Image (tube, grey):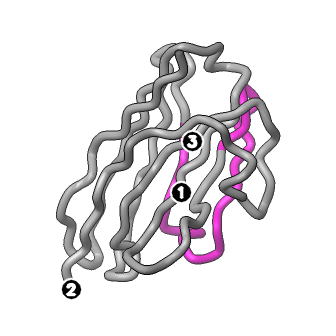
Amino acid sequence: EVRLVESGGGLGQAGGSLKLSCQASGFTFDDYAIAWFRQAPGKEREGVACISNSAGTTYYDDSVKGRFTISRDNAQNTVYLQMNSLKSEDTAVYYCAADYVRCKATMRVADFGSWGQGTQVTVSS
């Protein structure tokens, strides 16, 4: 059974930093791309960052490029999202997602079949 568990969300200040983790189990982690999506109230879920399988190629949405960094530790079956220079518009529930796909510049919800339960990130100004 594929399982993804996010952690590290909470309250951050504008200009500050938070680091999210996604612990994976139940599949061959090295073979899967992992992405972070987010969903703000009243808005559609959108792709934030994606990291390919063991090669580690990364993609970012323009809204977070230069501020967020996605990384993976294949030995720990964990993907991280380091979020710096937080803005109020980063407030959302953040989800990690996995699938046997290639990351693309445009991350689509439909491309990922396995999802975590989400973790709330709230940025205060």
Instruction: Please state which amino acid type lies under the numbered disc 1.
Output: Phe
- Depth check: give the residue in front, 65 or 40: 40
Are the residues flagged by discs 3 and 2 in contact, CB closer than 8 Å? no
The residue that appears at 43% across and 80% down in the rendered structure is 42
- Depth check: give the residue in front, 25 or 67: 25
State the image coordinates of residue 10 (x, y, percent, origin top left).
Answer: 20, 57
State the image coordinates of residue 49 (x, y, percent, origin top left).
Answer: 60, 55
Q: Which residue is mark 2?
A: 125
Instruction: Please state which amino acid type lies under the numbered disc 3.
Output: Ala
Q: From this viewpoint, which residue is outermost toward the bottom? A: 125
Q: Quadrant of residue 17?
A: bottom left
Distance of mark 1 from mark 3, alpha carbons? 7 Å
What's drawn in magenta, residue-wise? 51-71
Distance of mark 2 from mark 1, alpha carbons? 22 Å
Are the residues flagged by discs 1 and 3 in contact, CB closer than 8 Å? yes
Number of marks: 3
The residue that appears at 36% across and 46% down in the rendered structure is 20
Residue 43 is left or right of residue 112, and the answer is left
Q: Quadrant of residue 61?
A: bottom right
Above or below: residue 88 compared with residue 86: below
- Which of discs 2 and 1 lies nearer the camera? The answer is 1
- Asked which secondary structure carries label 3, the reply is strand
- Asked which secondary structure carries label 2, the reply is loop
Residue 89 is left or right of residue 44, and the answer is left
Q: Residues within 10 Å of mark 1 (few under 14, many from 20)?
A: many
- Depth check: give the residue in front, 94 or 65: 94
The overriding secondary structure of the stretch rendered in magenta is loop
Disc number for residue 37 = 1
The residue that appears at 57% across and 61% down in the rendered structure is 48
